[in-house]
Image (tube, helix red, strand yellow):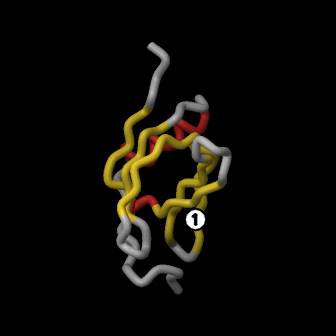
Amino acid sequence: MSHDNEHYTPINCDMHSQYELAIMHHTPLRLAWRDHAGLDHVCTVLPIDLQTEYGEEYLLAQDHTGQAIRIRLDRIVTAHPLTHE
């Protein structure tokens, strides 16, 4: 039973590992994604956790204001870690 109108497509293991590393190291990510309504978003977020619900995987994060956001992983178009180098 999906919460979304579209079928969930699992992401590849490399991307999943990138999200896990960003969470472990508190690395902000510059994300571009399309929400369930079809709207495009680009935002820098601090990834907090990964969550699975009804067979769908989500990234739990905070935006620059500290607001919690939840993004379905297969809706993320690009994810770039921001480093302090």
Which of 75 and 67 lies nearest the eye of the viewer? Answer: 67
Q: Is residue 24 above or below residue 16?
A: above
Q: Which residue does the image show at 34% across and 53% down from the upper left?
A: 12
Looking at the rendered image, the quarter that the C terminus falls into is top left
- Image position, residue 65 (x, y; %): 64, 44
Q: Is residue 12 above or below residue 44?
A: below
Which of 57 and 39 lies nearest the eye of the viewer? Answer: 39
Q: Which residue does the image show at 58% across and 39% down from the upper left?
A: 23
- Image position, residue 42 (x, y; %): 40, 49
Q: Secondary structure at mark 1?
A: strand
Q: Is residue 58 above or below residue 82?
A: below
Q: Which residue does the image show at 66% across and 52% down from the upper left?
A: 67
Query: Which of the 4 image quadrants contains residue 70?
Result: bottom right
Tag 1 residue: 52
Outermost residue toward the top in this view: 85
Q: Which residue does the image show at 38% across and 46% down from the upper left?
A: 15
The answer to whether 22 appears left or right of 74 in the picture is: right
